[in-house]
Amino acid sequence: MAGLSRPRRMWRGAVPLLLAAGLLSGCTSGRFAGGATTLAPGGSEPPTSIVPTTVPGTTESGRLAFLGSVERLPVMPVAKGQTGTLVPSPGTGEYRDVVQVAYRQLGSGKPLVLIPGQDASMTWWSPAVLQTLAQHYAVTVFDLPGVGYSGPPSSRPSVQSFADVTAGLIGELGLKAPVVLGWGMGGQVALALAERHAGLASDLVLLDTGIAGAQSLQAAPSVRAVLDSPSSTLSELAALAFPGSEGPARQAWLGELRAQIPDTVTSSAVSMEAALEQSAWSSRSLGSGTGSLDLPVLVMGGSSDPVFPAVDTVALASMIPGAQHYLWRGTGYAGFAQDPTQFATLVEDFTS
């Protein structure tokens, strides 16, 4: 599927089932003042002197103008146990570890970082979901290393190395105690970030994700075949996000993706993430620190999710002390996008 644009995910109209009550956390509010890295006091630290560059041809217009342009910054991965680092000077030996990360920022409020999952670029977050979240948060979406407008990874790709890059991006953008929200494989990256960089995030939201464990259930071989194959079509991927009776939501999501400026996921990126996810699933290293996590965690999922079955979200929540769990009945891998307003309200209630 070389060069094929594989857009991203969204949702509408679900019936939720609250499995565990109690909404946690709190933090000072920040505010995007309008620029990519210009934040008012309370939500960020002053950004570094590195100036982001705008990726040509990425400025949305019309009803999508609120998305703005894609920016790109050099980001230094943060070492395990640390919460920040400096980007070395170009030309130095250390600069080879730098990753060029592409991102968008929109909205105002408390910083919120969204991490996409397998096969997804930042455009898998539907405009409807982003616009709703941006009414409550200063939202940052980005492409993982090797995907879309971001540069290649500087080390062997893994959930942990992607977490270290995410930590570097948070620091480079000057985000202070952001809410970190990951979807699918992105939820695994978010969990690894919380385990490896304690104190960096204020709250953790894990959407339709899971990790290896006694009660976990890996996706069926037919599902993995769709996710892992560079030849899979966008329609086949959308059927996992919106299975069965979710046909209307699936078509609406596909329409929103196709309305955006494409952010390509190449064949090499698909293969890279397939190997990464298989490694993450077969290893028990991810999740080894869940018992010592010291931040509010919300785990959410769809009851008919074929990618990370509902049992995975239940098992993941049970591994994290004090974690809350929320399940949408009758929805798949994209259950949270069925009703953007309800989704944003749940996240806001949890993080306020």
Image: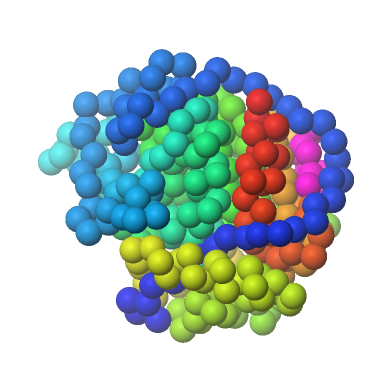
Looking at the rendering, which quadrant does residue 90 occupy?
top left
Q: Going by the image, does 32 lie left or right of 109?
A: left
The C terminus, quarter of image? top right
Q: Is residue 317 magenta?
A: yes
Residue at image x 59%, y 27%?
202
99 versus 320 height, above or below: below
Residue at image x 55%, y 44%?
132
113 versus 146 height, above or below: above
Whether residue 134 is visible, yes or no, is: yes
- Residue found at the far front of this picture: 62
Looking at the rendering, which quadrant does residue 259 occupy?
bottom left
> Looking at this view, is 232 or 10 the one in front?
10
Q: Going by the image, does 320 lie left or right of 126?
A: right
86 versus 144 height, above or below: above
Q: Give the x, y percent position of residue 105.
A: 39, 41
Residue at image x 56%, y 25%?
199
Magenta highlight range? 314-326
Q: Give the x, y percent position of residue 114.
A: 51, 45
